[in-house]
Amino acid sequence: SEKTIIAPSVLSADFSRLGEEVETVCRAGADWIHLDVMDGHFVPNITFGPPVVKAIRNRTDKVFDCHLMIAPADPFLGAFADAGCDIITVHAEATTHLDRSLQAIRDLGCKAGVSLNPSTPESAIEYVLDRLDLILLMTVNPGFGGQAFISSVVEKVRRVKSMIGSRPIHIEIDGGVTPETAPLVAAAGADVLVAGSAVFKGGNAEAYAKNIAAIRAA
Ligand code: DX5
Ligand code: ZN
């Protein structure tokens, strides 16, 4: 819908032209830029770290939405904040002391997010709701772009929406978001949609604008 936030994941961009890709996708209608950081330990893939985030920071004023798929996360929070991340999201499964990690993110002046894998119940975040600005519900097992949407998570979106009540917390969906799956999670209460392959397919500015518009229209 009009007010749904679309956050393209640069994981599906051309990394050899990353700065240019960020500029292009922002001009094509992206609201936020989603940054998938992977460590080859918490997830079976490696992407990039703070120096790359810092290198693309001056290409746009849009929100940098950083999804840390790393364990441990705490030692790197300061570096990601310094690199220019606006939102830093850690995985509940990767963080022993979640309450402490969330406080640390806010102390750095960033918005704090927590992510749950498809198999992790929403009860994992019941006692940290007041420390959260964003809840990222994975609709694929993290590690790779282009995977199939896991539809059992739609029910979890509904439960999380009712759990947060009137708190101003974003519900973000990540994995397998397309014009076909977007309406399912939006109807369940999600207000931020991450999309990698569905945005970057086609490989040029016109395609990105068309792809973003298709998700928004859905
Ligand atoms: C998966 C990442 C996602 C991924 C989404 O580990 O967190 O952000 O890039 O890619 P698509 O939209 O292609 O499923
Ligand atoms: Zn992500």
Image: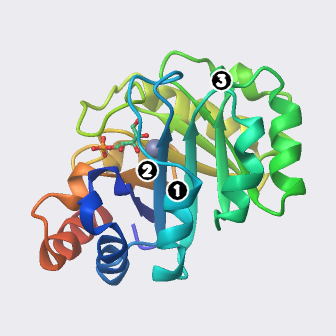
**Marks 2 and 3, how far apart at CA:** 27 Å
The residue beneath circle 3 is 94
Amino acid at circle 3: Ala
CB at disc 3 and ligand 1 closer than 8 Å: no
Q: Which residue is mark 2?
A: 186
Q: Position of residue 64 (x, y in %)?
A: 56, 65
In the image, what residue occupies the spot 76% across and 38% down? 75
Q: Measuring from the top left, give residue 185's x and y in whole percent.
A: 42, 43
Is 91 placed above or below 4 here? above
Give the residue drawn at x 22%, y 53%.
198
What amino acid is at disc 1? Asp
Position of 142 relative to 161 (above/below): above
User: Is 65 located above or below residue 48 in the figure?
Assistant: below
Q: Earlier in the sequence, mark 2 or mark 3?
A: 3
- Asked if disc 2 and disc 1 are in contact, CB closer than 8 Å, the reply is yes
Q: Quarter of the image containing the N terminus? A: bottom left
Q: Which residue is mark 1?
A: 191
Q: Name the image colouring.
A: rainbow
Mark 3 burial class by Cα count in 10 Å: few <14, some 14-19, many 20+? some
Is there CB contact under 8 Å for labels 3 and 1?
A: no
Q: Earlier in the sequence, mark 2 or mark 1?
A: 2
As drawn, which residue projects farthest toward the left?
202
Label 2 amino acid? Ala
User: Horizontal and vertical percent for residue 38?
Assistant: 48, 36
Q: Residue at x 25, y 71 (%)?
A: 213
